[in-house]
């Protein structure tokens, strides 16, 4: 339900930004935000996932994990700021920014938010480790709501253009940080501690995820950087529109992964964990496949109605992305399963292999066929990484391909019972704002 609301809020935000800024300024805005996101991931070191893993296994460690998160966020955030400041000294980087209409000063100012971004990334996983999925999801919902409100005020009403869009984004970061700190302090009852041995242990776990996280992020976003390098800000805006719509279909596996990482990590029975993941895989394979076909059918009128005729060149790249979106929508579940089972390095291996294909295809295809080539490259890399995740899972679980692809009668019965239970649930507000979820 949260992911559905997030989808609607993001569509509203994208509609205003796209209509008011136009493809060129939207491309500039997207690259600026992407630089901050890439820097954040570069210094994240997988500590958020480590918080989920160790917090789920030993809830008494949550106060220490929270205290360590404050220290790590500040230290690594400052490191990220220094890296960006150093990068701005590079003539190549400065030239890239100027070609995409980004002022050096804009990057230097906005990167100062990095410690807050890191802290939110770490602390929100404390809520997930605690099993508090309602609040965990509400954090994302709150950020999107504030961002949409800011866009409506700064971009639509006040007509501040690019500065208004950036201001809205900054406001959403600050707002979500305040809410996250408040709820995490309630979880640990106001007690936070520091344990250097635990922090080293978290780094040890996270470092196995780190290369994979970097590689997977580049699989998702390297194409945007390269479109900005080979083409123009206008084509960046068009391609970002296609990828943003396509990736909305991942909201379903993302919602499931939110719960699954905690659930699988807390299970001692690997057979039950494997059966659960296989069942989820069957349902998601069918669901995402049908949604991909539906999006292909409505892509032209959808983009024309929401974004306007200037964005119609986004239709073909959107269609080219669909096979990869379908594959990786399923693959994400199995990558999460392997990480929760203590094998995060598999995600790293799959992502690095996939990144190599992305880079080669992007460099070859983008200069020749533009943003459609970027979409083909991404789709191919998504399919490859999914093949790695699924192959390792099937081998370790001793399952066949049909066990994760073909929907079964008992799966539908479980879904019906879950849906009926959801309809019967009461006390949503108490669940959201009370002590337990």
Image (spheres, grey):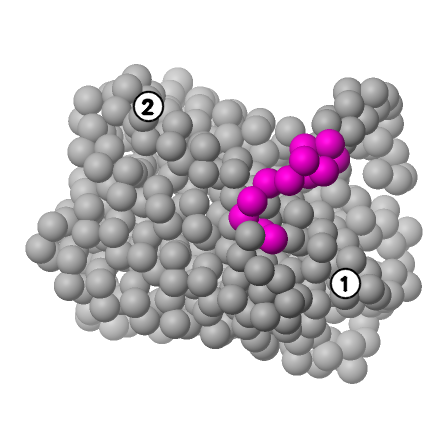
- Is residue 333 positioned above or below 16 on the image? below
Q: Which residues are magenta?
A: 403-414
Q: Is residue 413 part of the magenta span, yes or no?
A: yes
Identify which residue is drawn at 31% across, 57% down: 380
Q: Picture coordinates of residue 237 (x, y %)?
A: 25, 40
Mark whose residue sits in front, 2 or 1 = 1
Q: Nearer the viewer, residue 232 or 216?
A: 216
Q: Nearer the viewer, residue 280 or 185?
A: 280
Q: Which residue is mark 1?
A: 271
In which quadrant will I find the N terminus? top right
In which quadrant will I find the C terminus? top right
Q: Is residue 110 visible?
A: no
375 relative position to 367: left or right: right
Identify which residue is drawn at 67% across, 35% down: 409
369 relative position to 316: left or right: left
Q: Which residue is mark 2?
A: 298
Measure how far apart labels 2 and 1 are at the Cα level: 41 Å
């Amino acid at each position: 339900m949260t992911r559905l609301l997030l989808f609607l809020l993001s569509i509203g935000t994208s509609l205003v930004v796209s209509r008011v800024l136009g493809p060129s300024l939207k491309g500039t805005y997207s690259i600026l935000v992407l630089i901050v996101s890439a820097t954040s991931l570069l210094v994240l070191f997988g500590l958020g996932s480590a918080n989920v893993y160790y917090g789920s296994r030993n809830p008494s460690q949550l106060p220490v994990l929270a205290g360590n998160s404050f220290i790590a966020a500040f230290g690594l955030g400052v490191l990220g700021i220094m890296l960006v400041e150093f990068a701005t000294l590079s003539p190549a980087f400065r030239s890239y920014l100027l070609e995409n209409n980004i002022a050096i000063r804009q990057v230097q100012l906005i990167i100062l938010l990095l410690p807050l971004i890191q802290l939110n990334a770490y602390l929100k996983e404390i809520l997930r480790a605690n099993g508090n999925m309602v609040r965990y999801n509400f954090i994302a919902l709150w950020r999107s709501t504030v961002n949409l409100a800011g866009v409506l005020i700064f971009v639509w009403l006040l007509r501040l253009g690019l500065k208004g869009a950036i201001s809205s984004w900054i406001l959403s970061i600050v707002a979500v940080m305040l809410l996250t700190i408040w709820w995490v302090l309630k979880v640990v009852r106001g007690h936070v501690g520091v344990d250097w041995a635990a922090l080293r242990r978290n780094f040890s776990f996270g470092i196995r995820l780190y290369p994979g996280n970097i590689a997977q992020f580049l699989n998702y976003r390297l194409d945007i950087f390269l479109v900005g390098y080979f083409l123009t800000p206008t084509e960046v805006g068009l391609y970002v529109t296609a990828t943003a719509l396509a990736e909305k279909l991942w909201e379903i596996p993302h919602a499931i992964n939110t719960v699954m990482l905690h659930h699988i990590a807390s299970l001692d029975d690997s057979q039950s964990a494997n059966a659960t993941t296989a069942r989820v895989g069957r349902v998601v394979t069918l669901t995402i496949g049908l949604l991909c076909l539906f999006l292909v059918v409505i892509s032209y009128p959808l983009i024309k109605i929401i974004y306007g005729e200037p964005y119609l060149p986004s239709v073909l790249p959107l269609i080219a992305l669909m096979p990869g979106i379908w594959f990786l929508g399923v693959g994400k579940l199995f990558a999460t399963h392997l990480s929760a089972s203590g094998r995060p390095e598999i995600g790293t291996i799959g992502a690095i292999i996939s990144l190599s294909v992305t880079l080669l295809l992007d460099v070859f295809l983008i200069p020749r066929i533009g943003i459609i080539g970027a979409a083909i490259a991404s789709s191919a890399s998504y399919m490859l990484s999914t093949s790695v995740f699924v192959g390792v899972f099937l081998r370790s679980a001793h399952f066949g391909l049909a066990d994760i692809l073909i929907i079964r009668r008992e799966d539908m019965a479980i879904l019906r019972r879950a849906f009926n239970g959801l309809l019967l649930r009461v006390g949503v507000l108490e669940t959201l704002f009370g002590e337990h979820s």
